[in-house]
Amino acid sequence: MATQSLYRRFRPRKFSELYGQDHVVRALRNAVINGREGQAYLFSGPRGTGKTTTARILAKVLNCENPIEGEPCCVCDSCKAVEVGTSYDVLELDAASNNGVQEIRDIIEAAALTSPGRHRVFILDEVHMLTRGAEAALLKTLEEPPAQVVFVLATTDPQKISETIRSRVQHLQFH
């Protein structure tokens, strides 16, 4: 029997399993239900408040084959692939260790490719660690993103992100 860490075993799989972030859950579920998903989000808040988990749930529901009232079904192939980290439609980047221009250019190239799912979701964690050059490279894509691409930028320090990038995203604050 394989062991699994507690935080992975009990990590929320749906929006309804997230606690303490009702305003974020309401905004994202309503956007999905109404087909008005944003193309770029900024999730900010202290460590451990569920920013990355929420980004994964959003990625899951955007590509879910059978979404139910703004929630992922968690049983279709797309949902399972996102959960185990093998989805071609979801790319996560830890910007703390991959913070250069080339890494962002790689994302921009990947964003231009077609995707088997409905949306291509790029989750950039600790985005405040990007270099200024990397931010500039990302900005062009945020201004004119490909049609089915969604960016989720997560950070503990939103004030370290350029004002120009912050003005191009929907900012959701976690508590």
Image (cartoon, rainbow, N blue to C red):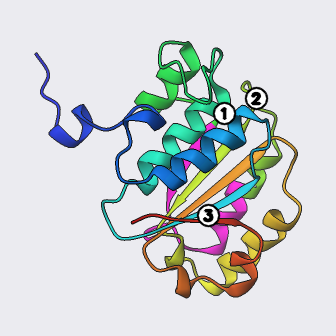
Compare residues 132 and 49 and report the one nearer the observer. Answer: 49
Residue type highlighted by circle 1: Leu
**Is label 1 in contact with label 2 (beta carbons under 8 Å)?**
yes
**Is label 1 in contact with label 3 (beta carbons under 8 Å)?**
no
- Asked if the magenta segment contains residue 93, the reply would be yes
Of the residues tagged 2 and 3, which is closer to the observer? Answer: 2
Of the residues tagged 1 and 3, which is closer to the observer? Answer: 1
**Is label 2 in contact with label 3 (beta carbons under 8 Å)?**
no
Q: Is residue 102 left or right of residue 136?
A: left
Task: Determine the secondary structure under disc 1.
Answer: helix
Q: Residue 62 carries which label?
A: 1
Q: Distance between the residues labelled 1 and 2?
A: 7 Å
Q: Residue 118 carries which label?
A: 2
In the image, the segment drawn in magenta is 90-107
Residue type highlighted by circle 2: Arg
Residue type highlighted by circle 3: Glu
